[in-house]
Amino acid sequence: MISRLKKLLLLALLACLCLVGNGCWSSDEPDNFAYVLAIGVDKGEENRIKMTYLIANSKEMGAGKEGGDAAQKSLITSIETPSLFVTLNTVNTYIGRKLTLMHAKIIIFSEETARSGLMGSFVPAMGQYREVRGTMFIGVTKGKAADRINAIKPILETNPAKYIELVASSGVYTGFIPQTELLNTMYISLSSDGIEPVTMLFGPSREQAASEDSADDGGELTSDAEEPVGGAGSAGNGMTGEYRAEGDYVAGTLPREGGINFGAMGAAAFRGQVMVGEMTGDEVVAWGMLTGKYRTSIMSLIDPLVPDTVLSATVSEGRKPRVRVRLEDGKPYIDVEVTLEGDILGIQSLIDYQQPDKQPVLEAAYTEKLAGLINGIIKKSQEEFRSDIFGFGLYARRLYLTQEQWKAVHWEEIYPEAEINATVNFKIRRSGMLIQIMPIINPEAGVEEGDND
């Protein structure tokens, strides 16, 4: 009888606990929040900074809302205040819903703020806020950050957040932009001795860049991109014919038409918390190969046997780069071995490069191009940036037992004088979907069926 009474009392107690625990203890419901998807940071005219927010319009992005104007999917607002977190409070005075950063995908700084060093002070401050995700993308834009945020009006996606994530992650399969995140990469690079930060570089279309440049005399935009910006693989680097490598551009110079006035190409290089230069898409590819962050990309090449044609291959990382660093009399000596593999995609000349006597010719041509890209960005990092953007210093610091010994080396000062030897190993692993390439029959030129020379 007593045991049964205890069971009844226990059940009654559990029922009371369920009643007490029922309901929401938070004062904020999900529909009381205004979800920020993207943030832009510019220098202000009336205050220290100008913050631009892309806020999701959950009413328009709900179930069944497939059509409609892309501009209605989000709300964009800009405001000038002394700091980021004060801005959150100020915007709440007219937005209605409470601003939250828990779903923010990206923060974009203008080139002006990046070159002034203001960007560096933002990164650790944002890491302290509980709503900010460490995986938030971070980048620099040509022109004003407010213009880039206003240009995020996706057509193929109903959710701007999805579009932002797809663009910022495209470097995984193009290699043209680095995968930089707020805390996981940027903050670690800023707070570590032996590596300097690199961030993705955003920009508009070439026409829009020219328009923004004419509207703002203080900008540093490059609207005329007829000549190569830099980097191996263009016609100006020992190749014949009218040819410019697909990655020999930075954001705002890509010769394109249509689409959205928002995109990423290349990277911004830093020395400490100050931006010191730009990298083209091809230079980012080479940077990724040296740092082990490169995966795969499609790379064109002047046909080594028929220079009037272009061939292409998928170039992938064979294995992580091998880096060896030694110091002799205070001078660094760095040896880097890069191993890559190729998968032939298309050959306009129809030469069968999978033949044993021709495959080494193609491998040598790709090796030469890749070595040119890699040595080019190494030289640029030492002479123009004077910044170890590859993290070779992280290997050098292993040579010392204590932090005091490592600090006495002053790696940032001796890196520009380092002697760096980069070796590229490239092998063709696959030759596409055809077992054998057959030529187009041309009796006048003496080409008959079966000829594959």
Image (spheres, rainbow, N blue to C red):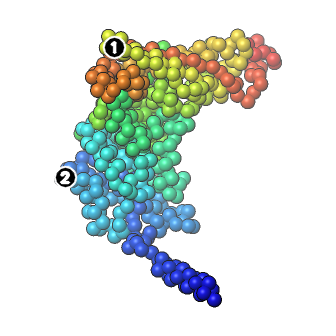
Question: Dividing the picture into quarters, in which one does residue 15 lie?
Answer: bottom right
Which percent across, then down, holds residue 409?
A: 29, 21
Which percent across, then down, holds residue 208?
A: 38, 43
Q: Nearer the viewer, residue 370 or 73?
A: 370
Against 28, residue 127 (above or below) is above
Query: For this view, does 45 lie left or right of residue 12?
Result: left
Query: For this view, does 317 lie left or right of residue 102?
Result: right
Q: Is residue 243 visible?
A: no
Query: For this view, does 433 lie left or right of residue 140?
Result: right
Quadrant location of the C terminus? top right
Which percent across, then down, holds residue 402?
A: 33, 26
User: Residue at (47%, 80%) from the top-left corner?
Assistant: 20
Against 294, residue 165 (above or below) is below
Against 209, residue 271 (above or below) is above
Circle 1 residue: 331
Label 2, residues with CA under 10 Å away: few <14, some 14-19, many ≥20: few
Tag 1 secondary structure? strand
Circle 2 residue: 47
Quadrant location of the N terminus? bottom right
Q: Nearer the viewer, residue 193 or 413?
A: 193
